[in-house]
Image: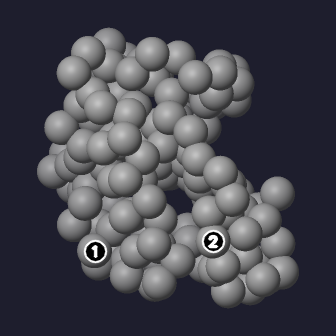
């Protein structure tokens, strides 16, 4: 498993255990800015702009993955969901792992055939450090 997949799996496990209860964001992180950045990346994913998503990754995270990895993840997880319609709801929560605190933008999205949950993890500088896409 490559480094990117390990990061995604780690974030998934952390989020599953914590249950996304709206924990405080890291000091200095603005909730509105986090949610806006999350929405921006979500729209890139939904629009197939995988190079732009890759460009939003923090340098050390980007070094462990590729545009093709992001594309494969999105296509696999969105298979059968149909076309993107809208964000039904969104929330922000704080998390930490391996001594690093970060914010997670959680987006519940409506697609034409299925609902999709997208979790986007950002460091305090709003650099993307992980993502999860899951049909509901």
Tell me which label, 2 or 1, sits earlier in the chain: 1
Residue, x 39% and y 63% (percent of image)?
41
* Residue 117 appears left or right of 46: right
Tell me the residue that label 2 is attached to: 86
Q: Please determine whether, in this image, residue 68 is positioned above or below residue 19.
A: below
Tell me the residue that label 1 is attached to: 52
Q: What element carries label 2?
A: strand
* Residue 3 appears left or right of 134: left
Residue, x 37% and y 82% (percent of image)?
49
* Residue 133 appears left or right of 128: right
Q: Where is residue 28 in the image (x, y as percent from the top left)?
A: 22, 21
Residue, x 56% and y 39% (percent of image)?
91
Residue 2 appears in the figure: no
Q: Please determine whether, in this image, residue 15 is positioned above or below residue 112.
A: above
Q: How crowded is mark 1: few (under 14 residues within 10 Å), some or many (20 or more)?
A: few
Closest to the observer: 18 or 110?
A: 110
Residue, x 65% and y 21% (percent of image)?
21
Quadrant housing residue 62: bottom left
Mark number for residue 18? none
Q: Give me the C-alpha separation between circle 2 and circle 1.
A: 20 Å
Quadrant housing residue 43: bottom left
Q: Where is residue 113 in the image (x, y as percent from the top left)?
A: 83, 80
Q: Is mark 1 on a helix, strand or loop?
A: helix
Q: Residues within 10 Å of mark 2 (few under 14, many from 20)?
A: some
* Residue 112 appears left or right of 25: right
């Amino acid at each position: 498993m490559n480094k990117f997949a390990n990061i995604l799996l780690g974030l998934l496990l952390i989020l599953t255990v914590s249950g996304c209860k709206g924990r405080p964001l890291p000091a200095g992180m603005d909730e509105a800015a986090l949610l806006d950045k999350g929405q921006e990346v979500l729209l890139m994913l939904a629009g197939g702009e995988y190079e732009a998503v890759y460009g939003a990754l923090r340098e050390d995270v980007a070094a462990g993955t590729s545009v093709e990895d992001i594309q494969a993840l999105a296509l696999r997880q969105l298979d059968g969901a149909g076309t993107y319609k809208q964000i039904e709801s969104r929330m922000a929560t704080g998390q930490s792992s391996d001594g690093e605190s970060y914010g997670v933008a959680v987006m519940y999205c409506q697609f034409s055939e299925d609902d999709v949950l997208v979790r986007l993890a950002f460091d305090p500088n709003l650099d993307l450090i992980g993502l999860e896409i899951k049909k509901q």
